[in-house]
Amino acid sequence: MKKALSLILALALSCSLFASCSSGTTTSETSSETQSSAAEESTGGEESSASGSGEADISGNIIYAFWGDELERQQKEEFCASFSEVYPNATVEFMHIPSDYYLKLQTLAAAGDLPDVFGVTSQNIATMAPVSMTLDGFMEQYPDLVANIPQACLDAGLYDGSYYCLVNAVDPYGMAINKDIFADAGVEIPEDGWTMDDLEALLPQLTKVDEASGRTEYYALGVTVYNCDYYNFIGNYGGTFFEDGQSTWSTNQGVKDAITMLTNACLNGYAPSPAITTSSGLDNERLFITGKIAMFPGGYWTINSFYGADNSQIQFEWDYIDMPVQEGVDPVDPYVPGGTMASKDTEYPELVNAFLAYTLTDAGVMGSYQSGLSLPVNKELHDPSLLPYGEDLTLDYFYRAADYIFPQSALDLNASGGASESISIMNAELQLCYDGQQTVEQTLQNIDDKVNEIVSRDE
Protein backbone atom coordinates (compact mmCIF):
# COMPACT_ATOMS: atom_id res chain seq x y z
CA MET A 1 0.00 0.00 0.00
CA LYS A 2 1.33 3.42 -0.81
CA LYS A 3 1.68 5.23 2.43
CA ALA A 4 -0.56 8.25 2.65
CA LEU A 5 0.74 9.04 6.08
CA SER A 6 4.12 10.54 6.66
CA LEU A 7 6.03 8.73 9.38
CA ILE A 8 6.81 11.08 12.21
CA LEU A 9 9.55 9.49 14.20
CA ALA A 10 9.49 10.18 17.88
CA LEU A 11 12.81 10.32 19.61
CA ALA A 12 13.37 6.61 19.95
CA LEU A 13 15.01 4.84 22.84
CA SER A 14 16.86 2.00 21.11
CA CYS A 15 15.16 -1.34 20.57
CA SER A 16 16.11 -2.25 24.07
CA LEU A 17 15.79 0.91 26.13
CA PHE A 18 16.21 -0.96 29.31
CA ALA A 19 18.44 0.05 32.09
CA SER A 20 18.91 0.21 35.75
CA CYS A 21 22.04 1.20 37.50
CA SER A 22 23.12 1.80 40.98
CA SER A 23 26.29 2.97 42.53
CA GLY A 24 26.12 4.78 45.82
CA THR A 25 22.61 5.51 47.05
CA THR A 26 20.71 5.79 50.28
CA THR A 27 17.12 5.09 51.19
CA SER A 28 14.82 6.59 53.77
CA GLU A 29 11.23 5.76 54.62
CA THR A 30 8.36 7.82 53.30
CA SER A 31 4.75 7.20 52.37
CA SER A 32 3.89 4.89 49.50
CA GLU A 33 1.84 7.76 48.04
CA THR A 34 5.03 9.58 47.04
CA GLN A 35 6.37 6.75 44.89
CA SER A 36 2.92 5.98 43.48
CA SER A 37 2.32 9.57 42.41
CA ALA A 38 5.77 9.72 40.84
CA ALA A 39 5.00 6.62 38.80
CA GLU A 40 1.68 8.15 37.79
CA GLU A 41 3.53 11.21 36.52
CA SER A 42 5.77 8.97 34.40
CA THR A 43 2.76 7.49 32.62
CA GLY A 44 0.80 10.62 31.94
CA GLY A 45 -1.13 10.67 35.22
CA GLU A 46 -2.47 7.14 35.08
CA GLU A 47 -1.63 4.76 37.85
CA SER A 48 1.32 2.63 36.86
CA SER A 49 1.89 -0.99 37.75
CA ALA A 50 5.55 -0.02 38.13
CA SER A 51 4.83 1.78 41.37
CA GLY A 52 5.91 -1.29 43.31
CA SER A 53 5.19 -2.10 46.92
CA GLY A 54 8.10 -0.37 48.66
CA GLU A 55 7.66 2.69 50.89
CA ALA A 56 11.18 4.06 50.47
CA ASP A 57 12.06 7.44 49.05
CA ILE A 58 14.75 6.22 46.67
CA SER A 59 17.77 8.47 46.27
CA GLY A 60 21.35 8.33 45.06
CA ASN A 61 23.58 8.43 41.98
CA ILE A 62 23.43 5.46 39.59
CA ILE A 63 25.20 4.52 36.35
CA TYR A 64 23.77 2.87 33.25
CA ALA A 65 25.94 1.64 30.35
CA PHE A 66 24.90 0.92 26.80
CA TRP A 67 26.26 1.03 23.24
CA GLY A 68 24.79 2.84 20.23
CA ASP A 69 25.30 5.81 17.95
CA GLU A 70 25.10 9.49 18.81
CA LEU A 71 21.31 9.63 18.49
CA GLU A 72 20.94 6.67 20.82
CA ARG A 73 23.27 8.33 23.29
CA GLN A 74 21.08 11.41 23.35
CA GLN A 75 17.92 9.35 23.67
CA LYS A 76 19.23 7.32 26.57
CA GLU A 77 20.46 10.41 28.37
CA GLU A 78 16.98 11.87 28.01
CA PHE A 79 15.46 8.67 29.35
CA CYS A 80 17.77 8.68 32.36
CA ALA A 81 16.85 12.31 33.00
CA SER A 82 13.14 11.45 32.86
CA PHE A 83 13.66 8.79 35.52
CA SER A 84 15.27 11.39 37.74
CA GLU A 85 12.25 13.63 37.26
CA VAL A 86 10.03 10.87 38.63
CA TYR A 87 12.52 10.12 41.41
CA PRO A 88 13.87 13.61 42.16
CA ASN A 89 16.30 12.37 44.81
CA ALA A 90 17.96 9.99 42.36
CA THR A 91 20.19 10.79 39.40
CA VAL A 92 21.20 8.49 36.55
CA GLU A 93 24.50 8.89 34.75
CA PHE A 94 24.63 7.34 31.30
CA MET A 95 27.90 5.68 30.27
CA HIS A 96 28.11 5.54 26.49
CA ILE A 97 30.34 2.76 25.09
CA PRO A 98 30.00 3.02 21.29
CA SER A 99 32.51 0.30 20.35
CA ASP A 100 34.07 -2.89 21.77
CA TYR A 101 31.19 -2.85 24.22
CA TYR A 102 31.51 -6.28 25.84
CA LEU A 103 35.29 -6.20 25.94
CA LYS A 104 35.13 -2.89 27.80
CA LEU A 105 32.43 -4.17 30.15
CA GLN A 106 34.57 -7.17 31.03
CA THR A 107 37.60 -4.91 31.54
CA LEU A 108 35.56 -2.71 33.89
CA ALA A 109 34.32 -5.78 35.74
CA ALA A 110 37.87 -7.07 36.21
CA ALA A 111 38.87 -3.69 37.64
CA GLY A 112 35.89 -3.65 40.01
CA ASP A 113 34.28 -0.75 38.13
CA LEU A 114 31.42 -2.49 36.35
CA PRO A 115 28.51 -0.07 35.81
CA ASP A 116 25.62 -0.74 38.15
CA VAL A 117 23.32 -1.52 35.26
CA PHE A 118 24.12 -2.32 31.64
CA GLY A 119 22.36 -3.41 28.48
CA VAL A 120 23.06 -6.77 26.86
CA THR A 121 21.93 -8.83 23.92
CA SER A 122 20.46 -12.19 24.78
CA GLN A 123 23.44 -14.26 23.62
CA ASN A 124 25.71 -12.45 26.10
CA ILE A 125 23.67 -13.10 29.24
CA ALA A 126 25.69 -16.18 30.15
CA THR A 127 28.96 -14.29 29.68
CA MET A 128 27.92 -11.49 32.04
CA ALA A 129 26.01 -13.59 34.59
CA PRO A 130 29.04 -14.29 36.85
CA VAL A 131 29.41 -10.56 37.57
CA SER A 132 25.68 -9.82 37.71
CA MET A 133 23.03 -10.08 40.39
CA THR A 134 19.92 -12.16 39.91
CA LEU A 135 16.66 -10.37 39.24
CA ASP A 136 14.54 -12.92 41.08
CA GLY A 137 13.89 -10.27 43.73
CA PHE A 138 12.61 -7.90 41.07
CA MET A 139 10.18 -10.54 39.84
CA GLU A 140 8.84 -10.92 43.37
CA GLN A 141 8.63 -7.17 44.00
CA TYR A 142 6.72 -6.34 40.81
CA PRO A 143 4.38 -9.30 40.18
CA ASP A 144 1.80 -7.17 38.36
CA LEU A 145 4.39 -5.89 35.89
CA VAL A 146 5.84 -9.34 35.34
CA ALA A 147 2.37 -10.76 34.72
CA ASN A 148 2.09 -8.53 31.63
CA ILE A 149 5.32 -9.84 30.07
CA PRO A 150 5.09 -12.79 27.63
CA GLN A 151 6.62 -15.89 29.15
CA ALA A 152 8.98 -16.27 26.19
CA CYS A 153 10.49 -12.87 26.97
CA LEU A 154 10.89 -13.71 30.64
CA ASP A 155 12.53 -17.02 29.76
CA ALA A 156 15.04 -15.27 27.53
CA GLY A 157 16.48 -13.66 30.68
CA LEU A 158 17.08 -16.96 32.48
CA TYR A 159 20.50 -18.35 33.26
CA ASP A 160 21.22 -21.34 35.48
CA GLY A 161 17.68 -21.33 36.86
CA SER A 162 17.55 -17.65 37.85
CA TYR A 163 16.59 -14.43 36.11
CA TYR A 164 19.64 -12.35 35.31
CA CYS A 165 18.30 -10.16 32.52
CA LEU A 166 15.08 -8.20 32.18
CA VAL A 167 13.91 -8.06 28.57
CA ASN A 168 12.08 -4.79 27.96
CA ALA A 169 11.33 -4.92 24.25
CA VAL A 170 10.81 -7.64 21.67
CA ASP A 171 10.91 -7.79 17.89
CA PRO A 172 8.49 -10.51 16.79
CA TYR A 173 9.00 -11.91 13.32
CA GLY A 174 6.52 -11.47 10.51
CA MET A 175 6.51 -11.92 6.74
CA ALA A 176 6.45 -8.63 4.89
CA ILE A 177 4.75 -9.05 1.52
CA ASN A 178 4.71 -7.05 -1.69
CA LYS A 179 1.02 -7.08 -2.63
CA ASP A 180 1.78 -5.77 -6.11
CA ILE A 181 3.93 -8.81 -6.89
CA PHE A 182 1.22 -11.16 -5.64
CA ALA A 183 -1.28 -9.39 -7.90
CA ASP A 184 1.08 -9.46 -10.89
CA ALA A 185 1.65 -13.19 -10.40
CA GLY A 186 -2.06 -13.86 -9.92
CA VAL A 187 -1.41 -15.45 -6.53
CA GLU A 188 -3.67 -15.17 -3.50
CA ILE A 189 -2.09 -13.78 -0.32
CA PRO A 190 -1.77 -16.59 2.25
CA GLU A 191 -4.24 -16.64 5.10
CA ASP A 192 -3.45 -17.09 8.80
CA GLY A 193 -2.23 -20.59 9.50
CA TRP A 194 -0.36 -21.14 6.23
CA THR A 195 2.33 -23.79 6.32
CA MET A 196 5.88 -24.36 5.15
CA ASP A 197 4.47 -26.57 2.40
CA ASP A 198 2.40 -23.59 1.24
CA LEU A 199 5.52 -21.43 1.23
CA GLU A 200 7.47 -23.93 -0.88
CA ALA A 201 4.61 -24.10 -3.38
CA LEU A 202 4.63 -20.31 -3.74
CA LEU A 203 8.36 -19.99 -4.49
CA PRO A 204 8.21 -20.69 -8.26
CA GLN A 205 4.90 -18.82 -8.62
CA LEU A 206 6.29 -15.60 -7.15
CA THR A 207 9.53 -15.57 -9.13
CA LYS A 208 9.56 -13.84 -12.51
CA VAL A 209 12.39 -14.02 -15.04
CA ASP A 210 12.48 -11.97 -18.24
CA GLU A 211 12.67 -14.48 -21.07
CA ALA A 212 14.61 -12.22 -23.41
CA SER A 213 17.35 -11.07 -21.06
CA GLY A 214 17.27 -13.89 -18.52
CA ARG A 215 17.23 -11.31 -15.75
CA THR A 216 15.11 -11.91 -12.67
CA GLU A 217 12.43 -9.23 -12.39
CA TYR A 218 11.47 -10.29 -8.89
CA TYR A 219 12.24 -13.08 -6.44
CA ALA A 220 9.80 -14.94 -4.22
CA LEU A 221 11.72 -14.87 -0.94
CA GLY A 222 14.45 -13.01 0.89
CA VAL A 223 17.01 -15.42 2.38
CA THR A 224 19.78 -14.20 4.68
CA VAL A 225 22.40 -15.69 6.97
CA TYR A 226 21.10 -13.66 9.91
CA ASN A 227 20.70 -16.03 12.87
CA CYS A 228 17.17 -14.95 13.81
CA ASP A 229 16.00 -15.68 10.27
CA TYR A 230 17.16 -19.28 10.28
CA TYR A 231 16.16 -19.71 13.93
CA ASN A 232 12.62 -18.87 12.83
CA PHE A 233 12.53 -21.24 9.88
CA ILE A 234 14.15 -24.05 11.85
CA GLY A 235 11.75 -23.60 14.76
CA ASN A 236 8.70 -23.37 12.51
CA TYR A 237 9.72 -26.62 10.85
CA GLY A 238 9.79 -28.13 14.34
CA GLY A 239 13.58 -28.30 14.39
CA THR A 240 15.99 -28.25 17.32
CA PHE A 241 19.57 -27.16 16.62
CA PHE A 242 21.10 -27.31 20.11
CA GLU A 243 20.15 -29.81 22.79
CA ASP A 244 21.77 -31.33 25.89
CA GLY A 245 24.84 -29.16 25.43
CA GLN A 246 25.45 -30.30 21.86
CA SER A 247 24.89 -28.90 18.38
CA THR A 248 22.33 -31.03 16.50
CA TRP A 249 22.25 -29.48 13.04
CA SER A 250 23.21 -32.68 11.21
CA THR A 251 20.95 -35.04 13.17
CA ASN A 252 17.67 -33.12 13.49
CA GLN A 253 15.14 -33.50 10.69
CA GLY A 254 13.50 -30.11 11.23
CA VAL A 255 16.88 -28.41 10.83
CA LYS A 256 17.58 -30.36 7.65
CA ASP A 257 14.17 -29.48 6.22
CA ALA A 258 14.59 -25.76 6.94
CA ILE A 259 18.10 -25.41 5.57
CA THR A 260 17.30 -27.56 2.54
CA MET A 261 14.32 -25.34 1.70
CA LEU A 262 16.32 -22.13 2.09
CA THR A 263 19.25 -23.52 0.10
CA ASN A 264 17.04 -24.76 -2.73
CA ALA A 265 15.32 -21.37 -2.86
CA CYS A 266 18.69 -19.76 -3.56
CA LEU A 267 20.00 -22.42 -5.95
CA ASN A 268 16.77 -22.51 -7.96
CA GLY A 269 16.70 -18.74 -8.34
CA TYR A 270 13.64 -18.18 -6.13
CA ALA A 271 15.71 -16.12 -3.70
CA PRO A 272 18.82 -13.99 -4.24
CA SER A 273 21.81 -15.84 -2.87
CA PRO A 274 24.41 -14.05 -0.71
CA ALA A 275 26.68 -13.92 -3.77
CA ILE A 276 23.98 -12.13 -5.76
CA THR A 277 23.27 -9.56 -3.07
CA THR A 278 27.00 -8.95 -2.63
CA SER A 279 27.58 -8.44 -6.34
CA SER A 280 24.55 -6.14 -6.65
CA GLY A 281 25.55 -4.07 -3.65
CA LEU A 282 22.02 -4.44 -2.26
CA ASP A 283 20.97 -6.53 0.71
CA ASN A 284 17.64 -8.37 0.90
CA GLU A 285 15.99 -5.56 2.83
CA ARG A 286 16.87 -3.04 0.14
CA LEU A 287 15.75 -5.46 -2.58
CA PHE A 288 12.37 -5.70 -0.89
CA ILE A 289 12.13 -1.93 -0.57
CA THR A 290 12.85 -1.55 -4.30
CA GLY A 291 10.17 -4.08 -5.27
CA LYS A 292 12.42 -7.02 -6.16
CA ILE A 293 11.30 -9.50 -3.47
CA ALA A 294 7.76 -10.74 -2.87
CA MET A 295 8.18 -12.04 0.69
CA PHE A 296 10.65 -10.78 3.27
CA PRO A 297 10.92 -12.37 6.74
CA GLY A 298 11.90 -9.83 9.34
CA GLY A 299 11.36 -8.45 12.80
CA TYR A 300 9.12 -5.66 13.99
CA TRP A 301 11.97 -3.17 13.49
CA THR A 302 11.63 -3.51 9.71
CA ILE A 303 8.52 -1.31 9.89
CA ASN A 304 10.81 1.65 10.49
CA SER A 305 13.16 0.61 7.70
CA PHE A 306 10.39 0.17 5.17
CA TYR A 307 8.58 3.39 5.93
CA GLY A 308 11.61 5.63 6.09
CA ALA A 309 11.80 8.81 8.14
CA ASP A 310 10.06 10.84 5.46
CA ASN A 311 7.75 8.11 4.11
CA SER A 312 9.94 7.82 1.02
CA GLN A 313 10.91 4.17 1.14
CA ILE A 314 8.39 1.65 -0.19
CA GLN A 315 6.29 2.87 -3.10
CA PHE A 316 4.01 -0.13 -3.56
CA GLU A 317 1.21 -1.88 -1.69
CA TRP A 318 2.59 -3.95 1.20
CA ASP A 319 1.74 -5.40 4.58
CA TYR A 320 2.71 -8.11 7.06
CA ILE A 321 1.30 -11.63 7.41
CA ASP A 322 2.08 -14.56 9.69
CA MET A 323 5.28 -16.51 9.28
CA PRO A 324 4.48 -19.96 7.89
CA VAL A 325 4.52 -22.85 10.37
CA GLN A 326 4.57 -26.55 9.58
CA GLU A 327 1.34 -28.28 10.52
CA GLY A 328 1.37 -29.53 14.12
CA VAL A 329 4.29 -27.28 15.17
CA ASP A 330 4.04 -24.52 17.77
CA PRO A 331 5.17 -21.22 16.19
CA VAL A 332 8.33 -19.60 17.50
CA ASP A 333 9.43 -16.03 18.05
CA PRO A 334 13.22 -16.10 17.86
CA TYR A 335 14.05 -12.45 18.24
CA VAL A 336 14.45 -10.81 21.62
CA PRO A 337 16.81 -7.85 21.26
CA GLY A 338 18.22 -8.00 24.74
CA GLY A 339 17.65 -6.39 28.06
CA THR A 340 19.20 -5.10 31.24
CA MET A 341 21.51 -6.71 33.75
CA ALA A 342 22.82 -5.31 37.03
CA SER A 343 26.16 -5.62 38.79
CA LYS A 344 26.17 -8.12 41.64
CA ASP A 345 28.25 -5.59 43.59
CA THR A 346 25.58 -2.91 43.57
CA GLU A 347 24.80 -1.83 47.12
CA TYR A 348 21.30 -0.62 46.43
CA PRO A 349 19.17 -3.18 44.61
CA GLU A 350 15.97 -1.27 45.45
CA LEU A 351 17.09 1.58 43.21
CA VAL A 352 18.00 -0.92 40.51
CA ASN A 353 14.57 -2.49 40.74
CA ALA A 354 12.81 0.87 40.58
CA PHE A 355 14.68 1.74 37.40
CA LEU A 356 14.00 -1.66 35.86
CA ALA A 357 10.32 -1.19 36.57
CA TYR A 358 10.40 2.26 34.98
CA THR A 359 11.76 0.79 31.74
CA LEU A 360 8.55 -1.21 31.39
CA THR A 361 6.23 1.81 31.59
CA ASP A 362 5.10 3.78 28.57
CA ALA A 363 7.71 6.40 29.43
CA GLY A 364 10.32 3.70 29.00
CA VAL A 365 9.20 2.13 25.75
CA MET A 366 6.84 4.37 23.81
CA GLY A 367 9.53 6.23 21.89
CA SER A 368 10.87 2.95 20.53
CA TYR A 369 7.36 1.58 19.94
CA GLN A 370 6.09 4.65 18.11
CA SER A 371 9.20 4.69 15.95
CA GLY A 372 8.59 1.14 14.80
CA LEU A 373 11.85 -0.08 16.31
CA SER A 374 10.55 -2.60 18.81
CA LEU A 375 7.45 -3.85 20.55
CA PRO A 376 7.14 -3.33 24.31
CA VAL A 377 7.00 -6.54 26.30
CA ASN A 378 4.33 -4.96 28.51
CA LYS A 379 1.23 -6.27 26.74
CA GLU A 380 -0.91 -3.49 28.20
CA LEU A 381 0.83 -1.16 25.72
CA HIS A 382 -0.03 -3.20 22.61
CA ASP A 383 -2.31 -0.57 21.12
CA PRO A 384 -2.05 0.22 17.39
CA SER A 385 -3.71 3.61 17.94
CA LEU A 386 -0.48 4.72 19.62
CA LEU A 387 1.47 4.26 16.39
CA PRO A 388 1.90 6.74 13.53
CA TYR A 389 0.90 4.18 10.87
CA GLY A 390 -2.83 4.53 11.39
CA GLU A 391 -4.58 1.65 9.66
CA ASP A 392 -1.93 1.24 6.98
CA LEU A 393 -0.42 -1.91 8.45
CA THR A 394 -1.81 -5.11 9.90
CA LEU A 395 -0.05 -5.38 13.25
CA ASP A 396 -2.21 -8.02 14.94
CA TYR A 397 0.29 -10.68 13.94
CA PHE A 398 3.11 -8.98 15.85
CA TYR A 399 1.01 -8.78 18.99
CA ARG A 400 0.22 -12.49 18.73
CA ALA A 401 3.80 -13.39 17.95
CA ALA A 402 5.02 -11.71 21.15
CA ASP A 403 3.45 -14.67 22.98
CA TYR A 404 5.08 -17.34 20.82
CA ILE A 405 7.74 -19.55 22.37
CA PHE A 406 11.35 -18.47 22.22
CA PRO A 407 13.30 -21.39 20.68
CA GLN A 408 14.69 -23.51 23.48
CA SER A 409 17.68 -24.25 21.27
CA ALA A 410 18.60 -20.57 21.26
CA LEU A 411 18.20 -20.31 25.03
CA ASP A 412 20.37 -23.39 25.55
CA LEU A 413 23.04 -22.14 23.17
CA ASN A 414 23.02 -18.75 24.91
CA ALA A 415 23.45 -20.49 28.27
CA SER A 416 26.50 -22.37 26.97
CA GLY A 417 28.49 -19.14 26.85
CA GLY A 418 29.58 -19.83 23.28
CA ALA A 419 26.63 -18.32 21.43
CA SER A 420 28.33 -15.34 19.80
CA GLU A 421 31.21 -17.37 18.38
CA SER A 422 28.88 -20.20 17.36
CA ILE A 423 26.55 -17.83 15.50
CA SER A 424 29.50 -16.50 13.51
CA ILE A 425 30.33 -20.08 12.51
CA MET A 426 26.72 -20.80 11.52
CA ASN A 427 26.48 -17.65 9.42
CA ALA A 428 29.70 -18.37 7.55
CA GLU A 429 28.82 -21.99 6.81
CA LEU A 430 25.29 -21.15 5.67
CA GLN A 431 26.59 -18.50 3.29
CA LEU A 432 28.74 -21.13 1.58
CA CYS A 433 25.73 -23.42 1.41
CA TYR A 434 23.32 -20.83 -0.01
CA ASP A 435 25.94 -19.88 -2.61
CA GLY A 436 26.23 -23.52 -3.69
CA GLN A 437 29.84 -23.90 -2.60
CA GLN A 438 29.08 -26.87 -0.34
CA THR A 439 26.19 -29.26 0.18
CA VAL A 440 23.55 -29.02 2.87
CA GLU A 441 24.89 -32.21 4.46
CA GLN A 442 28.45 -30.89 4.61
CA THR A 443 27.24 -27.56 5.97
CA LEU A 444 25.26 -29.13 8.80
CA GLN A 445 28.15 -31.41 9.72
CA ASN A 446 30.64 -28.53 9.68
CA ILE A 447 28.40 -26.50 11.98
CA ASP A 448 28.10 -29.40 14.43
CA ASP A 449 31.85 -30.06 14.46
CA LYS A 450 32.82 -26.42 14.97
CA VAL A 451 30.08 -25.44 17.43
CA ASN A 452 30.64 -28.53 19.57
CA GLU A 453 34.32 -27.68 19.72
CA ILE A 454 33.43 -24.19 20.96
CA VAL A 455 30.94 -25.25 23.62
CA SER A 456 33.13 -28.09 24.91
CA ARG A 457 36.05 -25.69 25.23
CA ASP A 458 33.88 -23.24 27.19
CA GLU A 459 32.67 -25.84 29.70
Image: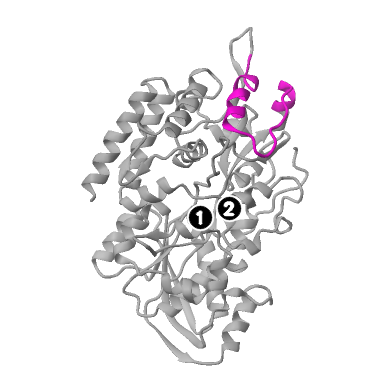
Looking at the rendering, the stretch of residues picked out in magenta corresponds to 181-209
Residue 6, placed above or below residue 278: below
**Residue labelled with disc 2:** 402
Residue drawn at (42%, 22%) of the image? 435
Image coordinates of residue 130 in percent, x first then y, are 29, 63
Residue 317, placed above or below residue 113: above
Q: Is residue 71 visible?
A: no
Quadrant of the image occupied by residue 163: bottom left
Residue drawn at (57%, 78%) of the image? 51
| Residue 207 part of the magenta segment | yes
Quadrant of the image occupied by residue 26: bottom left
Q: Secondary structure at mark 2?
A: loop
Specify the amino acid type for callout 2: Ala
Q: Are marks 2 and 1 in contact (CB under 8 Å)?
A: yes
Neighbour class for label 2 at 10 Å: few (<14), some, many (≥20)? many
Colouring method of the image: one colour
Q: Which mark is residue 8?
A: none
Q: Which mark is residue 152?
A: 1
Image coordinates of residue 443 in percent, x first then y, are 35, 27
Residue 54, placed above or below residue 364: below
Q: Secondary structure at mark 1?
A: helix
Specify the amino acid type for callout 1: Ala
| Residue 219 part of the magenta segment | no
Residue drawn at (62%, 20%) of the image? 207
In the displayed structure, does residue 73 sit left or right of residue 416?
A: right
Q: Quick one: label 2 or label 1, which is nearer the N terminus?
A: 1
Residue drawn at (63%, 49%) of the image? 398
Spatial separation of the CA atoms under disc 2 and disc 1: 8 Å
Residue 230, placed above or below residue 278: below
Q: Residue furthest front?
A: 328
Neighbour class for label 1 at 10 Å: few (<14), some, many (≥20)? many
